Structures are given as C-alpha cells and as structure tokens.
C-alpha cells in the first residue's frame, strides 16, 4: 500500500525547485503533441515562496487519511458552482458560452461515470473504477479583453494588477480561467491548501471543452477533468517521480507518465511490474485514452469536502 502521508520536511525537499514561466507565442502556432500540465511545477514554485504551504498540505493529507479510514466521506451530494473567467485577445480565444457549457458537461459526465468510454475500463480495473458523484453547474462567465499573447504559469491571469481577473468567491466557487497559457502547457491547477487569491484551474482556451477536431488529441475536454482532479487533491498517477506515489492505494505504481494512446496492457518497470492504469484521468495520455478515476481517488477527493476538510464550504 502506498504511503498517504508526506512529512513537511519531505515535501520541502521534494518540491525544492521553482518554475517561472514567461510569455511565449511560439507554442500557439500549432497543436501540442504531448499533454503538458504545469500543476506540479506551479506547486513547486509556491512551496519555495511559502514554506508553510508544505505544512498545510501535510495537514490536509493527514486529515484525508483519517477521513478515509473513518468512512466519513461525502458521497454524491456536492455540487460545484463554476465561474469561468475568459481572457481573450483574438476572436478564437473569446470562447463561446456554448463551448464553455461543453466543458461543464464533460466534467459532469467524467465525475459521474456517465462518459461513454467508462465501459472501456479493462476487467483488471473494473473493481476499482469509480463514480465520483460530484456535479458541476455553470454559475457565471466573466470576460476581459487583453493585449497579452500568452500568460505563462505564474498566476498573472488571476491578478487584476497584471491584466487578469481575480477569482470570484473562491471558497464556495470553482474558478476556471480560459486563456492562452503558452510554453506547451494545456492547463494547471492549484492544490488545496494554497492561497484563496489564486485558487482555481487554468485551461488553455484551445483545449477548453469540446473545441473541435482541429485541436485533437486534446479536444474532448479531458484537460479540464485532469486539472479539476488536481484541484480536488489528486496527484499525477506516477507521483511526479520514478515509481513515485500518488498517495492512493488502489492505483498501480507507474514508472513515469504515459503519452499518446498506450497499448494495453502496459507494464510498469517498478517493483512487481504491475499493469499501469494508463486510462486514468491523472496520467498524461491523450483525451480519448483517459476515462476513469479509481475508488481510492474518489475517497481522496471526497475527503476535502467533509466538515473540517480543506474545501468544506463546498460540501454538505
């Protein structure tokens, strides 16, 4: 069984790097070939800037373990209001309300096992595939014109002083930002425990919702599913380290991230050579190759919404 606790010291050592992304327009010319999620890099920068964040996250993980062991978890009774902040320079970046709604629809399907490919989960993992039971509803769309060609990953899009839009009541609403990120990044999220002033999920506007075949292989809205998973305290399935831990007991140990559409079964090179759960939303595979959360991931997400949890204001 994987460890479900990280000490503050270990977290500080693990997340000792800082990433400062700058504006870049080169990556906006053509479609991205491999999934790029900057959530871990952003976390590393936040941990370096604020060492107390490691302590808060360690406390959240300790609370999560206790909630899972006690069985006191929310189950299908959390509805997340979503505020979408659209920052646009071009007409294409000013995504329509209809496209925004498709992202909400994808989240509702993927987090409630209503996605059509849920039945494609291999028999090996059928016993742990999960209906998370958390729903989403579009609350508000806020739009702002900008001259920026790309925003990077330093949270500039969340700050009015830097031309962005501040989050709307982030303790009770999930804020999504749709904008051009640049640098080959499809999206990134802030984990529970971070500052409320920057809380939420950023998704490049080209990969927001069902944006069309021109943006395949990331045209099915799964960037949103992946990043909202981070916002709900899920780590990458390979633990962002060779044979690392994602702090979930029922996901196999992956030796590293997977890309594209891996052939099944894909074996890990880690101890025991388990078959990797490449179809998990928290891997790096193409949109059409990811289609499940596990029960362990469901419990980890549910724990943050109970009384005393880091996102309890969203709970019952």
Image: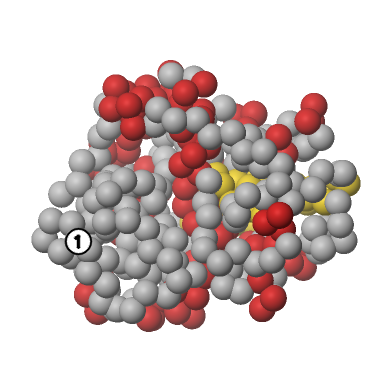
Q: 305 or 90, which lies in front?
A: 90
Badge 1 element: loop
* Image location of residue 300, percent across then percent down: 35, 47
Image quadrant of residue 204?
bottom right
Q: 104 or 67, which lies in front?
A: 104
* Image location of residue 297, percent across then percent down: 34, 54
Q: Badge 1: few (under 14), some or many (20 or more) residues near its Cα, within 10 Å?
A: some
- Callout count: 1
Residue 250 seen anywhere in this rendered image of the structure: no
Q: Is residue 210 left or right of residue 262?
A: right
* Image location of residue 12, percent across then percent down: 36, 25
Q: Is residue 53 above or below residue 171?
A: above
Q: Residue furthest left?
A: 272
- State the residue at coordinates (65%, 67%): 31
Image quadrant of residue 257?
bottom left
Q: Is residue 261 left or right of residue 37?
A: left
Q: Is residue 148 above or below residue 131?
A: above
The residue at which mark 1 appears reads as 269
* Image location of residue 183, percent across then percent down: 63, 49
Residue 3 seen anywhere in this rendered image of the structure: yes
């Amino acid at each position: 069984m994987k460890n479900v606790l990280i000490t503050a010291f270990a977290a500080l050592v693990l997340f000792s790097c800082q990433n400062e992304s700058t504006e870049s327009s080169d990556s906006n010319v053509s479609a991205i070939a491999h999934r790029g999620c900057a959530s871990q890099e952003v976390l590393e920068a936040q941990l370096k800037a604020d060492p107390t964040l490691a302590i808060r996250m360690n406390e959240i993980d300790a609370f999560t373990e206790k909630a899972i062991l006690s069985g006191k978890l929310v189950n299908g009774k959390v509805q997340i209001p979503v505020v979408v902040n659209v920052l646009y320079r071009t007409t294409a970046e000013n995504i329509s309300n209809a496209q925004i709604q498709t992202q909400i629809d994808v989240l509702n399907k993927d987090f409630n096992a209503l996605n059509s490919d849920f039945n494609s989960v291999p028999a090996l993992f059928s016993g742990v595939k999960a209906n998370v039971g958390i729903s989403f509803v579009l609350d508000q769309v806020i739009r702002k014109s900008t001259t920026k060609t790309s925003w990077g990953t330093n949270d500039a899009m969340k700050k009015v002083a830097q031309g962005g839009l501040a989050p709307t009541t982030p303790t009770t609403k999930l804020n999504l930002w749709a904008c051009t990120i640049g640098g080959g990044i499809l999206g990134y999220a802030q984990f529970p425990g971070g500052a409320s002033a920057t809380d939420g999920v950023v998704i490049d506007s080209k990969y927001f919702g069902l944006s069309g075949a021109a943006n395949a292989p990331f045209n099915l809205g799964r960037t949103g599913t992946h990043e909202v998973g981070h916002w709900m305290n899920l780590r990458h399935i390979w633990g962002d380290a060779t044979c690392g831990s994602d702090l979930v007991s029922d996901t196999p140990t992956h030796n590293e991230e997977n890309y594209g559409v891996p052939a099944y079964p894909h074996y890990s090179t880690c101890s025991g050579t388990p078959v990797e759960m490449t179809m998990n939303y928290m891997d790096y595979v193409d949109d059409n190759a990811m289609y499940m959360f596990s029960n362990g991931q469901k419990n980890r997400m549910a724990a943050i919404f109970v009384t005393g949890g880091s996102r309890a204001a969203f709970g019952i």
